[in-house]
Amino acid sequence: MEPALPEPALAGAAARSRFAWCLTGSGHGLTEALALAERLPDTDLFLSAAAEEVLGIYNIPLEGLRQRFRLVRDKTASAVPVGQLYTDVYHTVVIAPATSNTVAKCAFGISDTLPTNMFAQAGKLGIPGLVFACDTEPVVVTRAPHDWVTLRPRRIELDNVERLRGIDFCDVVESIERLEQALDARLKALSMSWRTA
């Protein structure tokens, strides 16, 4: 993934060493997205309150995630953990999967959850963002907790995805396959590699 604009030269940029992976309240591609996150080096998970609810619904316990990631939870009104972006810890912010709610907020500059705050502040710092948007096609077949469902995103959801594509330092992908490709490109740009088992 290449940012829309060149990354600015930052004091301490060499210290940027981690991926910030944000989870929202989407179950679409959740297990597949987490499997990709596990393969990345030095990755922390940032959980919205909705993400914590959905993880429980999909029987993904926080204790299991803690064994593989450092977890950052949305427990403050002002999204205090976002401050880690200012200390040159993270080189990339990933939101995957991203609900239509999160996509709309990011597209219109609304920052009222941990993931949307991470996205906004990363963009202001010139840190590349990668968003796996869930509602990108006229028909989306997705796995709900107990069955498969067919969704038909409305024009407003599709329009918000297109608006998000125009945001600086943001790459939007429509599938797990495209997410993996974008992450692979980002790793190469950082001279990094996927983790092996």
Image (tube, helix red, strand yellow):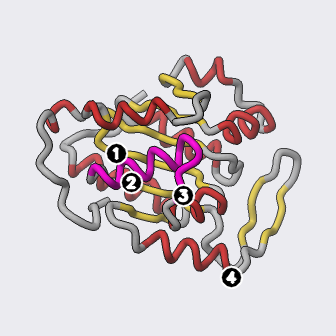
Query: Which mark, residue 92?
Result: 1
Query: Which mark, residue 114?
Result: none
Camera-nearest residue between 62 and 195: 62
Distance between mark 3 and mark 1 Cα atoms: 20 Å
Hey, what amino acid is under mark 2? Gly
Task: Examine the structure image and report whether residue 96 is included in the region drawn in magenta.
Answer: no
Magenta stretch, residue numbers: 110-125
Which residue is pictured at 36% across the width and 31% down the height? 84
Task: Examine the structure image and report whether residue 113 is included in the region drawn in magenta.
Answer: yes
Mark 3 / mark 1, whichever is N-terminal: 1
Distance between mark 1 and mark 4 Cα atoms: 30 Å
Residue that extends furthest to the front in the rendered view of this protein: 78
Instruction: Tell me if 160 is positioned left or right of 27 in this view.
Output: left
Query: Which mark, residue 110?
Result: 3
Distance between mark 2 and mark 3 Cα atoms: 16 Å
Write down the residue under mark 2. 129
Asked whether the beta carbons under mark 4 and mark 3 sit within 8 Å of each other, the answer is: no
Distance between mark 2 and mark 4 Cα atoms: 24 Å
Hey, what amino acid is under mark 1? Thr
Asked whether the beta carbons under mark 2 and mark 3 sit within 8 Å of each other, the answer is: no
Point out the image quarter for the C terminus: top left
Write down the residue under mark 4. 155
Residue 132 pos. (x, y %): 53, 58
Crowd tier of the residue under label 4, counting other residues whose Cα lies within 10 Å: few below 14, some 14–19, many 20 or above: few
Hey, what amino acid is under mark 3? Ile
Residue 24 pos. (x, y %): 62, 46
